[in-house]
Amino acid sequence: MDYEQVRAVDSAVADALAGEDTRQEETLAMIASENHVSKAVLEAQGSALTNKYAEGYPGKRYYAGCEYADEVEQLAIDRAKELWGAEHVNVQPHSGTQANQAVYFATLDPGDKILSLDLTHGGHLSHGHPANFVGQFYEVEQYEVDPETGYLDYDGLAEMADEFDPDMIVSGYSAYPREVEWERIQDVADDVGAYHLADIAHITGLVAAGVHQSPVGVTDFVTGSTHKTIRAGRGGIVMTSEEHADDIDNAVFPGGQGGPLMHNIAGKAVGFKEALQPDFEEYAQQVVDNADVLAETFADHGFEVVSGGTDTHLVLVDLRESHPDLPGGEAEDALAEAGIVLNANTVPGETRSPFNPSGIRAGTPGLTTRGFDEEATAEVGELIYRVVDNHDDQRVIDEVSERIDELCAAYPLYE
Ligand SMILES: *Cc1c(COP(=O)(O)O)cnc(C)c1O
């Protein structure tokens, strides 16, 4: 984009926006929670709907002039229902965290008990970290993955639930590479009489495409983000049954938010329409196939891959075996210098600080959007290993950087 209008008003912001476009075009976005939306979604998000107040829901707004807002939001809702097969969908949460907030607000009182996965084992801040409102308003205990296998410890979870007697169990994760068995966790929730929230933020697209099993219709509530494996722009979503529909709608607005971001909801509507096209299933399958190849390439070179592989879009590497003296943050920096942008991540049984943990997390949604197949992804996997293994060798970093430039040019983002 040329940002002509912005530049006329504010060249500093225009320069930063153009810089960001170039950065995304000329580097590989391998942060597992990131992706690239289409120009159609960008255009919808940049529309005049940003000007519109539309507190309320389609057909029952607190403001006049909402006829087009109604149309856009209803389209987003109808398409989401079709994509995920949910009875009721709320598309107004500004983010995944606010979608979770709405579920807690609809079901819990302050001081009630939440059982969720530990952050360092792949959980999310909004599942009960002390620095988040969830950790401060509710009593939180956390389950873990099996440190040996890296898989969820379903039996351990059941034992903890028995003892802790939670009001809410949260499943769905930020750094868990394996398929989640929703029904096993639902059985635990049934046994102890707890609500069950499945937060599919990372895998909304994989679930919509049917390449990961769906919690919709299994758990009481499903939340998601609209910008990770589905390319509908930044935002959140809540799905539930008719039974909880009003409670959720009231918890989103007026419970936790004011006016909805109607321009973002337009982006969601367009992105959902794109995801309803037949080629989206191919995309989602390719995301998983590419992650599989990435995990294999890593393991072949000697990285320790948490859980031994992946069923999803992400691969988690524990550097402590192969590179015990290299904190994840330094690996992240060396890779960024070479044009591969991913993040340092905690690993099960973490022994370093969360600010500079022992692992790196790599995702394939962004690469796959650019058209990377298994062969191209395997090459990226080799390049990642090379950089990490030679993180203090500038010559290697420069060589890899040149190759990343070539790959980015061969798989352009916005032509
Ligand atoms: C990314 C993520 C969210 C949503 O985060 P926001 O940044 O608030 O949109 C929620 N839950 C999990 C498990 C996530 O990984």
Image (cartoon, rainbow, N blue to C red):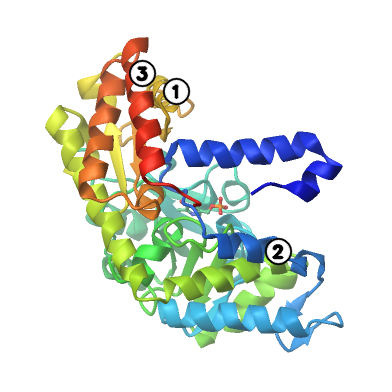
Residue located 49% across and 75% down the image: 273
Q: Which mark is residue 256?
A: 2
Amino acid carrying label 3: it is Ile
Image spot of residue 283 (x, y percent): 33, 62
Q: How far apart are the two marked residues, 2 and 1, measured between alpha carbons? A: 40 Å
Residue at mark 3:
397
- Camera-near label (2 vs 1) is 1
Residue located 79% across and 42% down the image: 7
> Residue 407: in sight, yes or no?
yes
Residue at mark 1:
337
Element on which disc 1 rests: helix
Q: How far apart are the two marked residues, 3 and 1, measured between alpha carbons? A: 7 Å
- Asked whether, in this view, residue 357 is left or right of residue 73, the answer is left
Do labels 3 and 1 touch, CB within 8 Å? yes
394, above or below 315, in the image: above
Image spot of residue 173 (x, y percent): 40, 52
Which residue in the rendered view is the most extreme toward the left? 300
Q: How far apart are the two marked residues, 3 and 2, measured between alpha carbons? A: 46 Å
State which quadrant residue 130 falls in.
top right
Amino acid carrying label 2: it is Gly
Image spot of residue 300 (x, y percent): 12, 33
* Ligand 1 lies under 8 Å from the Cβ of mark 3: no
